[in-house]
Image (cartoon, rainbow, N blue to C red):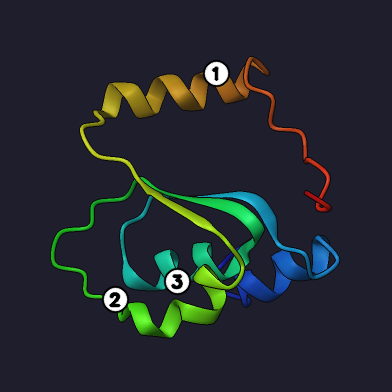
Amino acid sequence: MNAGAQDAVAALREVTGDNGVDVAIEIVGVAKTIEDAIYSTRRGGVTLLIGALGGISLSFPDYYRDVIQREMDIRPCFGKTQADFAKAVGLAAAGTLDLAPRSATR
């Protein structure tokens, strides 16, 4: 998917039957990708923020319905290195990580 050419949130919602993804991993660190990650996460899901967050200002009240009422978990990830990221990508590519979808009924 080319997020610049289409609405990433709408595409993910369509693929998941409007449930959203179990885990959204944001690695770019810009307001648009952070918002897209949050809005594409299912009820009770997790949004993992890995991208650099320096200088980004988000308006939390805009997320009241989409975070608090959906009981989402937003987890920042600080202290990572490029080597950590490369290792995680390598584990995912090797099939070592279980990336299979989970039931949306949790």
Check the image and report above or below for 65 versus 13.
below
Residue at the spot 24% in from the left edge and 51% down from the top edge: 52
> What residue is disc 1 on?
91
Around disc 3, counting alpha carbons within 10 Å, would you say few (fewer than 14), some (14 to 19), or many (20 or more)? some
Label 1 SS: helix
Q: Which quadrant holds the N terminus?
A: bottom right
On the image, which quarter does residue 16 sit in?
bottom right
Task: Look at the picture and state if 63 lies above or below 82.
Answer: below
Q: Residue furthest left?
A: 55
Q: Nearer the viewer, residue 58 or 33?
A: 58
Residue at horizontal 61%, vertical 23%? Answer: 93
Upstream in the sequence, badge 1 or badge 3?
3
Front position in the image: 21 or 63? 63
Residue at image mark 2: 58
Which tag, 1 or 2, sits closer to the chain's start?
A: 2
Question: Marks 2 and 3: CB-CB under 8 Å?
Answer: yes
Q: Is residue 83 above or below residue 72?
A: above
Residue 48 in sight? yes
Residue at the image position 58 percent from the left and 62 percent from the top = 71
Q: Earlier in the sequence, mark 2 or mark 3?
A: 3
- Categorize mark 1 by other alpha carbons within 10 Å: few (<14), some (14-19), many (20+): few
User: Which residue matches tag 3?
Assistant: 35
The spot of residue 13 in percent (x, y) is 74, 69
Residue ID at (39%, 25%): 86
Q: Which mark is residue 102?
A: none
